[in-house]
Image: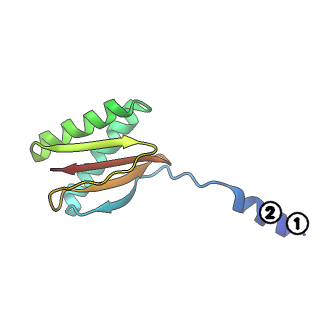
Amino acid sequence: MEEFADTKEDENKKIVHTYPLVQACDMSEEMKAETVEVIITACEKFGTDYFAAAKTVKQMLDKKYGPQWNAVVGEAFGIQITHQTNTLMYMFFGGNLGICAWKI
């Protein structure tokens, strides 16, 4: 009986991922690693100020890989985009914080 109660409690717990979880990416491995670092730095620096985090991600990617980058940072959004090949990154960080960066 006790084992069943422990199992029931484990099923009800939410799992919060504190590491970056890349959902979709068509970048090269080097570009992917650098983009993840830029995103993590911006999200950790600005916390819940998603506008400032997105602006920082965009500016950093513009400097590294040329202009026309876009970024969306938030907890609940839907998005449909057109992007250049090998320039899309869609990931989650800190649990439910979604980040999408792409180049037009």
Drawn side of residue 97 relative to residue 10, left or right: left
The total number of labels drawn is 2
Q: Residue 49's spot in the image, x, y percent?
A: 40, 30
The residues tagged by marks 1 and 2 sit, at their Cα atoms, a distance apart of 6 Å
Position of the N terminus, as image quadrant, is: bottom right
Q: Return the mark for residue 48.
A: none
What secondary structure is marked by label 2? Answer: helix
The residue drawn where x is 13% and y is 43% is 68
Q: Residues within 10 Å of mark 1 (few under 14, many from 20)?
A: few
Q: Which residue shows up at 71% across the image and 57% down it?
A: 12
* Residue lying at 19% horizontally and 36% vertically, measured from the top left: 59
Q: Residues within 10 Å of mark 2 (few under 14, many from 20)?
A: few
Q: Position of residue 94 (x, y in %)?
A: 47, 46
Mark 1–mark 2 CB contact (< 8 Å) = yes
Name the foreground residue: 79 vs 75. Answer: 79
> Which residue is outermost to the left?
66
> Which colour assignment does the render follow?
rainbow
Say what amino acid the circle numbered 1 marks: Glu
Whether residue 78 sits left or right of residue 2 in the image: it is left
Disc 2 marks which amino acid? Asp
Q: Position of residue 54 (x, y in %)?
A: 30, 37
Residue at left offset 27%, top offset 43%: 71
- Which label sits on residue 2? 1
Q: Residue furthest right?
A: 1
Say which element carries label 1.
Answer: helix
Residue 74, compared with residue 23, is above or below; it is above
The residue at which mark 2 appears reads as 6
Residue sitting nearer the eye, 103 or 42: 103
- Percent from the top left, x then y, of residue 13? 68, 55
